[in-house]
């Protein structure tokens, strides 16, 4: 048995949850916050048998897309920030960060 932890962007969470349910995966959805953009993420915890891991990964890949987003950079620390003008920059966000972990024991009460 494996535990899949998938950290995805909030915009993809409902689509992913619907796809997981459609393919009979049970998932726990947790609200989380990313450190890079300090924006909302969703973390999915998916427990599954070893033979179904690749199917779950395919579903995650198909439903969590990268996209470009404009963000304002943070002002520099120290020094004179009066002359600093933060111009928005385009960064790639989205997709999924996925961890697959072995499960030693699983119980459902």
Image (cartoon, rainbow, N blue to C red):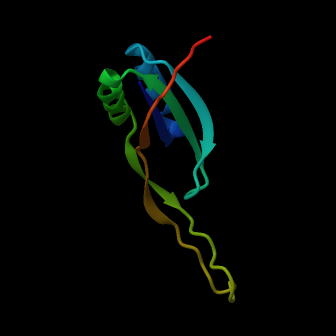
**Would you identify the image quadrant in which residue 51 lies?**
top left
Q: Residue at x 48, y 40 (%)?
A: 8
Residue at left 63%, top 75%? 75
From this viewpoint, which residue is outermost toward the top? 109
State the image coordinates of residue 54 (x, y, percent, origin top left): 30, 29
In this rendering, is residue 34 above or below 45?
A: below
Query: Can you say which quadrant of the picture contains the N terminus?
Result: top left
Q: Quadrant of residue 50?
A: top left
Residue drawn at x 58%, y 74% is 86
Q: Which quadrant of the view contains residue 99? A: top left
- The residue nearer to you, when weighing 33 against 82, is 33
Q: Point out residue 57 in the picture as x, y percentages from the top left corner.
A: 34, 32
The front one of 60 and 66 is: 60
Left or right: residue 45 compared with residue 66: right
Compare residues 99 and 20 and report the one nearer the observer: 99
Residue 19 point in image, percent of width and height: 40, 21
Residue occupying the far front of the picture? 104
How far across and down, in percent of the image, does residue 107 sit?
56, 16
The residue depicted at 37 percent of the width and 15 percent of the height is 23
> In the rendered view of the protein, which quadrant contains the C terminus?
top right
Count up the numbered dots: 0
Is 27 drawn above or below residue 30 in the view shown? above
Q: With respect to residue 37, does 64 lie above or below? A: above
């Amino acid at each position: 048995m494996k535990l899949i932890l998938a950290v995805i962007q909030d915009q993809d969470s409902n689509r992913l949850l619907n796809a997981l349910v459609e393919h009979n995966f049970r998932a726990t959805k947790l609200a989380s916050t990313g450190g890079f953009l300090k924006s909302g993420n969703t973390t999915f915890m998916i427990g599954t048998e070893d033979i179904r891991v690749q199917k779950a990964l395919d579903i995650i890949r198909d439903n969590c897309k990268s996209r470009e987003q404009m963000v304002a950079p943070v002002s520099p620390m120290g020094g004179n920030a009066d002359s600093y003008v933060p111009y928005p920059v385009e960064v790639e966000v989205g997709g999924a960060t996925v961890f697959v972990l072995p499960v030693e024991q699983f119980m459902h009460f």
